[in-house]
Image (cartoon, grey):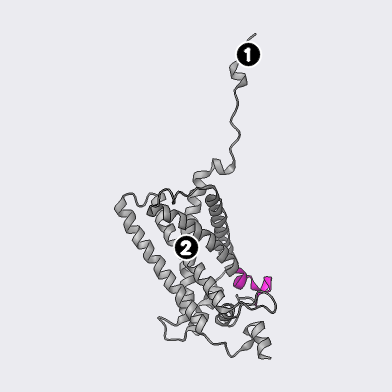
Amino acid sequence: MRENPLSTATTDPPRTFEQRHHFLLRKLHSLTGIVPIGVFLIEHLLTNSLASGWASSKPGPERFNEAVHSLHNLPYLWALELFGIFLPLAFHALYGIRIAMTSQSNVRAYPYMDNRRYTLQRITGYIAFFFVIIHLMKYRFAHIVGWGPEFIGSEDPFEITRHGLQAWEPFTGFVVPAWITLGFYLLGLWAACYHFANGIWSFCVSWGITVGERAQKRVGMAAAGVGVVLFAWGCMSLYAFAKAEPAENAAAHPTAMREAE
């Protein structure tokens, strides 16, 4: 009796959730990089740039504090942070790492501009991921990890930010030199701005907004302009905080209070 060949046919293993929804996950990853993360990045850097006092008749610290307080007084701030920032950011970062770890760069074999852009997008993604974690721990969750007072609700956010950049004390008795902290922030700022600007270009390509080569070049130039503006805003804020003198109210930061005593 001959065996039915159909009975011995092997069945394909069940596909994973990622394999079944690969297209959707890629689209969501691309979309969250623009909205809401990109929108928040623009707002965040613009608000920080006010510390320099540009486009205002008020001193930089006063204008910065007003802007920060107005944001912190928004209704349902916790929901905006959770669903508009933290969850999209976590998904974009973690799935982005997944993409970077499973992809292969051929920039050495084919050193073209698109391949260099592809490689830099992943490198800046790693840098921005590490930078954002440290930044959140330094300010948003500093009161939890023990790196400083709570930023939200503070009467002087400018002084907290200034102190965090000029005299960051992650461990008791160990103050990071200001030039290291500022250099780290400059690197993180560049990575975030490049990653977002290049993400605008890739978003328009992957979503079919720019089809022709000429349209892609135009969008690329516009995206580069956005990145330059954002980087300039960030540099303005870093310079403002770096050159600022400590506030008269030394109680704005626990370390400053101990130094005053």
Placement of the N terminus among the 4 image quadrants: top right
Q: Nearer the viewer, residue 105 or 102?
A: 105
Please give the range of residues in magenta: 136-148
Give the residue at x 41% y 58%.
Answer: 200
Q: Percent position (x, y) of residue 128?
A: 53, 63
Question: In the image, residue 215 lies at what x, y percent?
Answer: 31, 54
Q: Position of residue 253 (x, y in %)?
A: 64, 82
Q: Where is the C terminus found, in terms of image quarters? A: bottom right
Which secondary structure type mostly characterizes the magenta part of the structure? Answer: helix
Find residue 132 and report its image quarter: bottom right
Identity of the amino acid at label 2?
Answer: Gly
- Comparing 175 with 44, the one in front is 175
Foreground mark, 1 or 2?
A: 1
Give the amino acid at mark 1. Glu
Magenta-span inclusion, residue 78: no
> To which residue does mark 1 refer?
3
The residue depicted at 42 percent of the width and 73 percent of the height is 232
Give me the C-alpha separation between circle 1 and circle 2.
61 Å
Q: Residues within 10 Å of mark 1 (few under 14, many from 20)?
A: few
* Residue positioned most to the top: 1
Say what secondary structure mark 2 lies in.
helix
Name the residue located 60 percent from the left edge and 76 percent from the top edge.
151
Question: Label 2, on which residue?
Answer: 38
Which comes sooner in the sequence, label 1 or label 2?
1
Q: Along the horizontal axis of the image, is 244 left or right of 13? A: left
Is residue 139 located in the magenta-colored stretch of the structure?
yes
